[in-house]
Amino acid sequence: MTFDQIILTLLLLGIFTMIFGSVYFLPILFAKIKSQKFGLKLDFKQAHFLAKNKCLKKDFLIGLKEIWNIYPIELDKLISHYYAGGNLENLKVGISEMKLRNKEPDLVMLTALDLINRDLKIEVEKAANNEWKFEL
């Protein structure tokens, strides 16, 4: 292999690396920067997950931060709930109401009630008076 072929190979390899890096790493970097703007400290995997799911809207990131400040919920569950039409503010209220009553939040029930447009503060109060049985 001649010197010119080695230089050309290295140049092509560098171009490929730049293209791959811009397609793969730039959206993740953008997700990390945008989430930091709202006070979220995401690791690489979480930022990749947000970028892949195109879930970088301001209202989602603010809701995510507020919910994580109260109770740790897996990111994929919150994204699914958000894309299903859920209200993260209502979910936050429901979680905080359950935590106020020293009860472990029932995320499945809270998200289901939120998706059918129930006020979670009222629903948690009803459940507390009904031996923690939620009504659909």
Image (cartoon, rainbow, N blue to C red):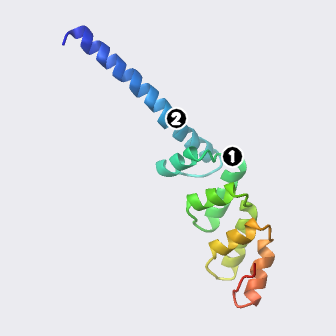
How many angstroms separate mark 2 from mark 1 (CA)? 17 Å
Decide: is 130 above or below 32: below
Question: Residues at badges 2 and 1 in contact (C-beta under 8 Å)?
Answer: no
Quadrant location of the C terminus in the rendered image: bottom right
Task: Identify which residue is drawn at 48% across, 36% down.
Answer: 24
| Nearest the eye: 94 or 133 | 133
Crowding near the residue tagged with mark 2, few <14, some 14–19, many ≥20 C-alpha atoms within 10 Å: few
Decide: is 126 above or below 73: below
Relative side of 94 to 41, left or right? right
**Type of the residue with mark 1:** Lys
Element class at badge 2: helix
Q: Residue tagged by mark 1?
A: 57
Q: Quadrant of residue 65?
A: bottom right
Quadrant location of the N terminus in the rendered image: top left
Element class at badge 1: loop
Q: Residue tagged by mark 2?
A: 26
**Type of the residue with mark 2:** Leu
